[in-house]
Amino acid sequence: MLLLRRFVPLALICTLALPAVSQPASGSIETIFAVAAETSSVPVDNSEWDNLLKAYVRPAENGLNRVNYRRFKAEAHGRLKAYVKSLEAVDVARLSRPDQFAFWANLYNSKTIDIVLDHYPVASIRDINLGGGLFAALTGGPWKAKVVTVSGQRLSLDEIEHTIMRGIFKDYRVHFAVNCASVGCPNLAGEALVGSRLDAQLEKGGRDFVNSTRGVTVTGKVVTASKIFSWFKEDFGSSDASILEHIRRYADVGLKERLAGATRISDYYYDWSLNDAKD
């Protein structure tokens, strides 16, 4: 299976995958979770998640936050599983839109780490196959398997990210909030997302990513960007000009200067290595 996966072009994988996860046949999941309250009427306790992130997420080189999976698994995997269970019990319809966004991002990120810890040590999350049909078997990764239950609905990570978060919120900053346990991904934040500070947290995620070498590099007139911008091009305006506009929004002064006059992106890249602290 590894040999077969090795010869499947990643660009083709993503091109084929996106329609299936963005537009479910029935639309029922998106309809169910489109309901929101004006103000949240139920509490979501993210204190445990906050504590776990502060304990096991380590800032490292080039602004990349890494996770100490070895210690996390040995010391606190049970606490993480209990936190995921607590999120599954939340009545999401009684949350406001900002609290819902934070809820789904925290659930996605915590369950992703839970899955990695279940299989650790691994070199990449793509080495974990939980089922989900032939396509999942070919491409690897746990994203298509039903792994959580919310409001009676069995959900996959793909459904959380693409059907619910991208489908309902229509906010490209979803891509700065969810983390797939890979070096190439925007950072796993060192704190839980919360509705009251969500906008500031998402903006920080965008700045941290764009100004890292994982987000954008400029060599002379050659601009290379993360494949996240090409995989989800429609979320960033569907053209190089629109993607560059989004990038410039978050770029620091030095990067903006290097991007001056740029009108196209020459190439895209992504590193699927596990974002493991290994210490």
Image (cartoon, grey):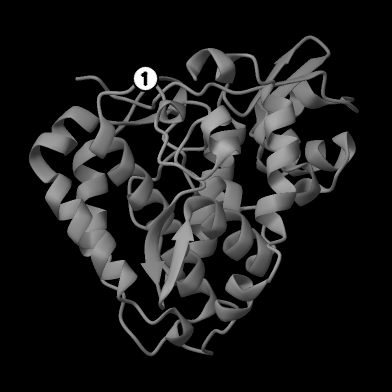
Residue at far top of view: 220
Residue 163: x %, y % from top left: 62, 61
Q: Which image quadrant: the C terminus?
A: top left
Residue located 52% across and 59% down the image:
160
Q: Return the residue nearer the eye: 224 or 182.
A: 182
Left or right relative to 170: residue 213: left
Residue 36: x %, y % from top left: 54, 84
Left or right relative to 241: residue 141: left
How many labels, in total?
Answer: 1
Q: Give the residue type at disc 1.
A: Ala
Residue at far left of view: 75
Residue 276, by quadrant, is: top left
Q: Return the residue nearer the eye: 126 or 262.
A: 126
Which residue is under mark 1?
Answer: 123
Q: Residues within 10 Å of mark 1 (few under 14, many from 20)?
A: some
SS at mark 1 in the image? loop
Q: Return the residue nearer the eye: 72 or 151.
A: 151
Above or below for 117 versus 165:
above
Above or below for 268 versus 141:
above
Report if residue 164 is visible in the image.
Answer: yes
Residue 229, by quadrant, is: top right
Report if residue 247 is visible in the image.
Answer: no
Left or right relative to 200: residue 61: left
Residue 113: x %, y % from top left: 32, 42
Residue 108, by quadrant, is: bottom left
Residue 200: x %, y % from top left: 51, 58
Residue located 70% across and 46% down the image:
18
Above or below for 186 versus 165:
above
Residue located 24% across and 20% down the image:
278
Residue located 51% across and 47% down the image:
144
